[in-house]
Amino acid sequence: MCGIAGIVYHDSERSVSENEIMRMVAQIDHRGPDGLGCYVKNNIGLGHARLSIIDLEGGKQPIHNEDSSIWVSFNGEIFNFVELRVELEGKGHHFYTLSDTEVIVHLYEEYGDDFVNHLNGQFAIALWDAPNNTLLLIRDRLGIVPLFYQQTHERLVFASEVKSILSTFDSSPRLNLSALDQLMTFWSPVSPGSLFEGVNEVTPGEILTVKNGAISCRRYWDWSFPDASGEYRSGSDEQLAGELHDLLIDSTRIRLRSDVPVGAYLSGGLDSSVLVSIIHNHSDAYLRTFSIGFEESGLDEQSYQNDLIQHLGADHSRIICSNRDVADNFVDTIWHTEAPVLRTAPVPMRLLSGLVRQQGYKVVLTGEGADEVLGGYDIFKETKIRQFWAKNSDSAFRAALLKRLYPYLDVSKRQGQAYLKNFFGMGLEQPNLAYFSHLPRWVTTAKCKEFFSDDLKSKLAENPYDIIGNSLPKALPRWHSFNRAQYIEAKSLMGGYLLCSQGDRMLMANSIEGRFPFLDHRVIEFANQLHPKLKMKVLNEKFLLKKAMGKYLPSNIVKRYKQPYRAPDIAAFSHEGRLPGYVEELLSESTVKRFGYFDPKRTQLLVKKVKKGRAIGHKDNMAFIGILSTQIWHSLFIEQFHEKFSVK
């Protein structure tokens, strides 16, 4: 992937400065270290930082059509560009590069803004139609590739990362308090909001059109499911598993298209193991894999990684992430996420992409998305159980179900039972609530907000539940409860955090492109037509995926209990009652009071608890990481604004 940036003035008599475009591009040159470029003419300026993957010599951007009336600055990959090029050449179009990017301008000539429906890929597109004085900003269906914009009365500024837009600011930005409130509830702001006041993202699957000063948005794709009483995809389990098998092989095959070597992440879980096995069994690509190990045994999956490496004979490299590594790299990680986080999990992912880069690779396949698409998360199991309990409040199977869901918990103890009853009992009286599935998680996460300062609380005018509720499609109430949970998970945690803070930003920090075969829209559209029981049979997650691909894998990987990817949180920062110097400074009573987001007294109580080793629960860990990362965010983007960003 690459980085894009640009400016369009609403008044066609105004002129864009090339220097300003290149200053924006310079802020995101980590996304594209292989070359910078720009196109500036009258009121439009398009910038580009290139990570060369396809057509290494000839694919410089921006790229234009035959008569230079259509220009595009593009970040991402079009995986079906080979087939599209043949089709377009058959219609008489002439290409001057071998790049996947060039199909975009010719497709646009053929189909107008409906061209996007022909693309299989991950992308952020800025397309300038000079004859019609029109700019299109388009983001891929899933939101794998980021794209932000700021609109003023005189112009629209856009870029792959907000730091590029900040380089056009006259003064330091302000934190969007409503977005922080949402992040401390849902793990990310509700799209299109961002942490920066006045800066929004182009929502996944959306086209934003700028023409003569008017801006309009159109959704061209979204997740959709049959009505609960409707028709699901028919066929035997074997037939449907065969269809999924073939789809995954093809989605992986076209994601191996590259003029540079392609590697793969290997966590030791089912999803990445499936992808690595497809590469091994269904391609000629050299099998090169990369993984993370942890010092803490409870977080480490090396034994499963080793089993698959031995099974397939992969050429493998691994980093071991220590607690100290997390603490030492946390500030730089927040610089790249551009948003607070509630877990440190992005840090090891950035270290892993650094390993990939050191080994001379630019592209990796990852298993992200399989849990959302094919029903792998515990939250889907919890939803099934809570729906059962909502209908059978006195069921004698309650303890047995919890034991099956969390085999490592001793639910026979009164304290454990009480916690689980409170956790899972949330909202049982409203089983048809649109976000019934996510209520326990969100209520637990929102406990971070108990640390908000009185001043911040007084400025919060909107209920975050209303905001996310209003963002949901009108058809959602008609869907099966399992599918409702899938949609919300895809739109909240996956879109706002996993693909962004933990995905794109950690990959591109080291100029690495991630590719996601499970997020091929054909795979999603197929899976969304499956009855939920084929995704989760009783409480057996990803049932159809195991049936389709299990034959390629060691049985212990197929049968293993799903272990969520985690990294050390508080444990990474607290050592023998001491915290790193920057943490002490940012969480001191005076600094917390000066920044103004959190209550200084309450924060100090949490810090003391951390130093004494008594902050070990889920709530304390999220609150500590959330507060610390917000303080870092403020320090980087507001306090150090004049040092880090060129100001006009």
Image (cartoon, rainbow, N blue to C red):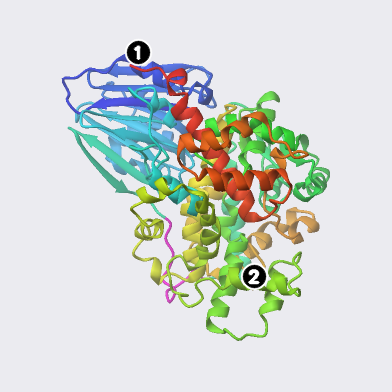
What type is the residue that disc 1 sits on?
Asn
- Write down the residue under mark 2: 420
The range drawn in magenta is: 223-234
Mark 1–mark 2 Cα distance, whole angstroms, equals 58 Å
**Which residue is at 42% across, 74% downward?**
230
Residue 131 within the segment the image draws in magenta: no
Instruction: Give the side of residue 641 with respect to residue 631, left or right.
Output: left
**Which residue is at 52% across, 33% downward?**
591
The x and y percentages for residue 290 are: 72, 36
Q: Are marks 1 and 2 in contact (CB under 8 Å)?
A: no
Q: Residue furthest top?
A: 19
Front of the two marks 1 and 2: 2
Where residue 367 is drawn, which disc sits there? none
Q: Is residue 275 above or below residue 633?
A: below
- Write down the residue under mark 1: 19
**Which residue is at 55% across, 34% downward?**
334
Q: Nearer the viewer, residue 165 or 99?
A: 165
Q: Nearer the viewer, residue 409 or 314?
A: 409
The x and y percentages for residue 524 are: 50, 55
Q: Secondary structure at mark 2?
A: helix
Q: Is residue 389 above or below residue 290?
A: below
What type is the residue that disc 2 sits on?
Leu
Q: Residues within 10 Å of mark 2 (few under 14, many from 20)?
A: some
Q: Secondary structure at mark 1?
A: helix
**In the rendered image, which quarter is residue 505 located in?**
top right
